[in-house]
Amino acid sequence: MPNGRDPRIDFFRGLALIFIFWDHVPHNPLGQITLRNFGFSDAAEVFVFLAGFAAVLAYGKIMQRDGYWMACLKILRRAWVLYVVHIFLLALLMGIVFFANSHVETRDLVSEMGLTHFVTHPQQALTDELLLRFKPNLMDPLPLYIVLLAGLPLVLPMLVRKPSVVVAVSLTIYLLAPWMGWNLRAIADGVWYFNPVTWQLLFVLGGAAAIHSQRPRPVETRPLLRQPLFVSAALYVLLAGILTLSWRWPEVHDAWMPSRLSDLLYPISKTDLSPLRLVHFLALAYVTAKLLPGAGWTQNRLAGEVCRMGRYSLEVFCLGVVLAPLADMVNAMANDALAVQLATAIVGALLMAGLAAWLEFNKRLDQRKVALHS
């Protein structure tokens, strides 16, 4: 474990980044094997939960070592860095998309990426950009993380000491938000695609899981199939996967899905983090943790590359945002040939892995320089 980190957390963060990239390249065949195709939740839930886990683990230690105000200072400084990165990344993304759009005739990349507002109202779009109200399709996770991280100082002390209390309050807000219409404003009288008022629950649950992971707990000796919670979670994940796969064949889905049950289940809101999505992710996370209790499986070469991507999640995420419209442009210029689509998806993931490797190499060089001068 580098620096005491749990490589499993880094692995799933890295895997989520790959899935996010593949999911945001239109017509990408590898997008058919990502998490969203086999259940109600997707890589966004993984990203937010593990962001909460990592943030509480890191800043909780800083608070215990250096005090609350120092932890607050570092949290807000990190949130400011993320904000600056978001502004720069959005400007870079717009430049890339407009360039790509001028080379593609088969589809409108500006519209695909949600940049029409900038074309029609450029001055207002600049103001909305600074206020985090203008977020193209690829950019939604970063503003959500900025808001959630900026709010962490409000709950960090209580979360470290009494996580159950914070979870209870967070759950109450989550349940009230859709009924009360709580969300942040976006462009054109809209709201945020990822509602921070509801998604905060997943961030808090990630933080509570981090606190729980630091405490001793009894070892479960019963086989997995004799543990009711594991069996229930696994069945839910299986049923959700079957239902999600049935969406590919609407006539099959409509034939066996009772209308009353359909009215009860749908729509499964991503904006407000529907309970079906939330429970699916929690069940999936629990089943995964039970099936992979140790970290030995992360020691192979391929898993190690994914773990390294997770350790540099911000930089790798930003590169994925930049690569997605470029991959879409190349695919469109090749008339969406399958071989080209596969190549852009794989090359994009390799470039993201390469960036992580380069960043770690530079970090080791800096550590050696410090060691030589100490």
Image: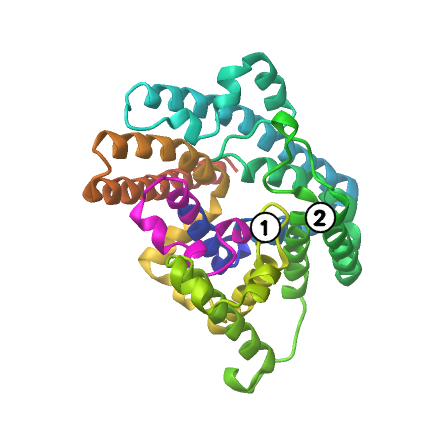
The correct choice, above or below, for 140 with respect to 57 in the image is above
As helix, strand or loop, the secondary structure at mark 1 comes to loop
Whole-angstrom CA distance, mark 2 to mark 1, is: 10 Å
Q: Give the range drawn in magenta.
A: 19-46
Q: Which image quadrant for residue 70?
A: top right
Residue 69, image x and y in percent? 78, 40
Q: Is residue 225 shown above or below 154?
A: below
Image x and y of residue 12, in percent: 47, 56
Q: In the rendered view, does 52 fall on the left or right side of 9?
A: right
Task: Please name the residue that numbered disc 2 is placed on.
Answer: 178
Classify residue 257 as left or right of residue 264: left
- Secondary structure mainly formed by the magenta segment: helix
Task: Answer few, some or many: residues within 10 Å of disc 1's Cα (few below 14, many 20 plus, some between 14 and 19).
Answer: few
Q: Which residue bears the numbered disc 1?
A: 269
Q: Which amino acid does label 1 sit on?
A: Ser
Find out whether residue 37 is within the magenta segment: yes
Q: Looking at the image, which residue is at 74% across and 47% down?
A: 177
* Residue 215 percent across, percent down from the top left: 68, 68
Number of residues whose C-alpha sits closer than 10 Å to that of mark 2, classed few (under 14), some (14–19) or many (20 or more): some
The answer to whether any part of residue 372 appears in the image is no
Seen at 67% across and 42% down, the residue is: 196
Towards the viewer: 121 or 163: 121
Q: Do the residues labelled 2 and 1 touch (CB within 8 Å)?
A: yes
